[in-house]
Amino acid sequence: MNTALKEYLAALVPKDFPDGRELVKEGIEIGNSFELGRSKFLQTFGYKNYFEYRKDCCSKGKMVWQILMGLATLEEEIEAIKTISDYSDRTGLDLRTVQSIPSMLVGLPYEYWEDAPKTTSYLMKDEKDWLAHTEAAPMTVVWQDWHLSSPNNLASTIAALKAGSPRIGTFSQLIWDFPGYRDEVKRYSDMVRSLGIIASKREDYITADSYPEDGIPGYFLDVASYVGYMLVEHYIIEDLCGAKMSISYGGLLTEIQPRMAFAMAMHKMLGKEDEPIMSYYNGGTVEQWDHDINANYGTGVQEMLIEILVELKYKMMTALNPVSVTERLRTPTLQELLDITSAGARLEEKAHEWLPLMDFTVLEDLRDHLIEKGQKFFRNVLDSFKEAGVDIEDPLQMIVMLKRINPCKFEEFFHPSVEETGSFTPYCPSVLGRQTMEMKDEVVAKLKAKGCKDALKGQKIVAVSADGHSYGLMLVDNVLTEMGGTVINGGVDMEPASVLDLADEEGTVFIAISAHNGQGIDYSKQIMKLAEERSREYTIFMGGMLNALLPGNSEPVDATDLINKTGVHASNDLEDLIRAVQNKKAV
Ligand code: B12
């Protein structure tokens, strides 16, 4: 490990935190003090636990289907659970699992709700709200989002288990901040206690679930790094906390070979016959059209076919969770979810006819390649942490380290190619990583053709992302660097004041902001106001998804003109940015 990395990591090591090993013990005690809920599903169908149901489906060559749903109110969510159950009874399709996604506010202690921004899905406060789901109909209900790693994780983990959730997630979401909440010690100490609770329910097959794309691996360019990172989480959950882990994924890893090889790698390394590691595949969200949406049945169904075939072959007990064809447009309706899921369940009836035609050698080779490189990545992380002074046997220290490392840099720090070749080279590029690099090559070629090569020589530009989306920022950083600029990449989730601080520290007035969450107008107003207070003439650019939910509209609309009115230059065209910097320079 080089000295700079060692110093960087050493500076992140948590001080004055409780001993994580003791917290696990506390969690186990809490877990032993209450019983798991027995859902109406288990009572009606007579299974001992949800794992028995999965095992039963697997032995019959049947898929487990899951519907992911977060409607506007608790009442609507409960009604929808009943409707899915009735639909299953009527059609004979076995759609018996729902993953409910409440509002992000459920992840915050109640006293923080008032000041936090409102979101589109429903709220839950008391344990009876969780119970209402699993008592509504003979359906299994699972909670992942905003539970295990949120500030409110202890209360929500207990409530979900008492209601009968067979797994609790989402471990990887530990990197997201929650509005207004700053108590790192309490949040992550409770997270370790919650893992202790889950460990106490090991015999009942309760798992701590992680969804890599919703966390640090969402910033990776290489699927091998996904594998390595998941080994780190597995080490924390299983080896340090004694809890069972499960893995779900699929929104971003949409290219079929790496998509399937990733699950197969996890299964081969971490799965056992009676302890499957995989929980579900989420449908891909990257390649869907936002126009002529019914064409998306094509991409959705081919994904489900290979998932079913791989399942029939390797028996990993991975559920299928398709996404609606309207995913790129808005939150789906219940009918849209039923449409795509029943398309998949009908496809299942024909899949066994395809199985004899399949040769899985290509997938198995890729799986083994990912395992080899992923294991090196994992060892690099542990060795480097240890060398930097982290107590790698303390789960709390490990979790806080993951939270504190810059997610945009994580991959390059530990990727085996760096020691093999001296520079970072992905072995199996992730879809978004590859698409972003291809996009970058295209933009660079166009700009060079227009005479922009070296146009930014001698110029320093601060580039940041206003939210958690990082690929737009990566593209901007790479393009401006290739045009001769010195880019200071401030990373993701940067608040306006911190962006200006960084520009001041770096002695530049040029700032490029990538924004995707529809917050462009408010963000621009805030940064311009702060800039005025500092009496400096910054030149600020913004690109990304420049829309906003404006009064009188039920969907976000283009906000480019309104952002421009604040004084921020809103455009996705990097040539505009380069020309504007050149013109400023000339003034
Ligand atoms: C990948 C992704 C994620 C990943 C992000 C991983 C990561 N490390 O970035 C994950 C899964 C974590 C994620 C989470 C969320 N996401 Co998201 N995500 C996407 C997705 C699929 C791709 C975005 C992307 O990276 N594209 C690749 C890059 C290279 O292209 P680009 O960003 O369009 O950039 C181009 C231009 O815009 C320009 N550009 C970009 N920045 C800048 C800056 C300047 C100065 C300039 C000049 C140009 C420029 O350069 C590029 C080339 O032209 C989009 C949907 C889509 N297909 O676009 C949704 C999307 C952006 N996400 C969305 C949402 C709502 C979210 C969440 C709030 C969802 C949730 N409920 O959890 C969270 C928020 C997370 C957070 N903390 O901010 C919405 C935004 C809705 C809107 N504004 O109307 C989208 C559009 C999906 C949708 N249809 O609903 N997401």
Image (cartoon, rainbow, N blue to C red):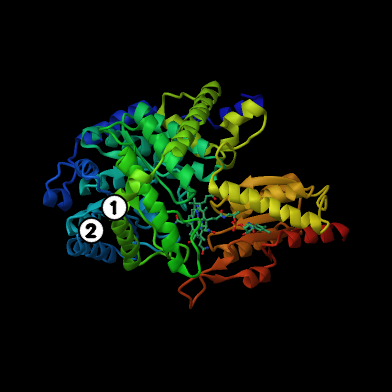
Q: Quadrant of ligand 1?
A: bottom right
Camera-nearest residue between 463 and 358: 358
Give the alpha-carbon distance from disc 1 to disc 2, as whole Å: 9 Å
Q: What is the x, y in percent for residue 511?
A: 70, 54
The amino acid pointed to by label 1 is Trp
Of marks 1 and 2, the one in the foreground? 2
Q: In this view, does 385 lie above or below 40?
A: above
The numbered disc on residue 65 is 1
The numbered disc on residue 93 is 2
Camera-nearest residue between 180 and 435: 435
Q: Is residue 108 above or below residue 114?
A: above
Q: Is residue 557 above or below residue 538?
A: below
**Displayed quadrant of residue 53:** top left
Disc 1 residue lies near ligand 1 with CB under 8 A: no
Quarter of the image that includes the C terminus? bottom right
The amino acid pointed to by label 2 is Leu
**Marked residue nearer the N-terminal end (1 or 2):** 1
